[in-house]
Amino acid sequence: MNDHRDNEWKCIDYLINGTSTQKLAYEILKSTKILEHLAPYQPILIGTIPIDIDILGSDIDIACEVYDPGQFKIDLISLFPDIEIIQRNSVVIGRTKIKNVDIEFYGENSPVTEQSGYIHMLVEARLLKLGNETFRKTIRDLKKSGLKTEPAFAKVLSISGNPYQKLLELYQWNEQELLQFFQLRELCKST
């Protein structure tokens, strides 16, 4: 199921009128031209900043489509000589800091729109759109207490099992199914 907002996430202009963190992310990405430099890897900003559930210390996450991990590492090092790079099988993770903000690059050998991090962001955005302000606040509070994003969503939604897998399953649900799920938990916006 494709989210109707898929294309909205590919252009970061939505950040211009966002929160102070979103504006900072936009300024960093534009001033450094990171997305332009990494264009061959189809980079997309993912994570908590685009969907406004970031907390103090949240990093800028950029997912990339990478079929040549060696070249991707070379390209990252040429852009950020001090970058820390970890490779796990065909996945490359690069971490650096710009203007005191952590930046994480995630390169996987599949289109970004099929990667778990991107899909998690899409389903989380849909859930946040349906949820009331208490829902968003509770997610943030759980994150501040140390929970990662997906486990925070699972806790608020009373979802048992692997939270990462369960959110991927929710991606397949249509809007009506998600709305009923929220209504049962009394988490939806008042109409």
Image (cartoon, helix red, strand yellow):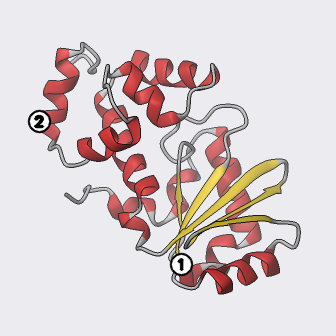
Q: Position of residue 108 (x, y in %)?
A: 51, 70
N-terminal label among 2 and 1: 1
Residue drawn at x 42%, y 73% as measured from the top left: 110
- Which mark, by number, is residue 176? 2
Q: Position of residue 93 (x, y in %)?
A: 65, 63
Q: What amino acid does circle 2 point to?
A: Gln
The residue under label 1 is 66
Q: Quadrant of the C terminus?
A: top left
Residue 2 falls left or right of residue 30: left
Which residue is at the front of the view, 3 or 65? Answer: 65
Q: What amino acid does circle 1 point to?
A: Val
Q: Quadrant of the N terminus?
A: bottom left
The answer to whether residue 89 is above or below residue 123 is: below
**SS type, badge 2:** helix
Q: Residue furthest front?
A: 89
- Which mark, by number, is residue 165? none
Residue drawn at x 71%, y 32% as measured from the top left: 56
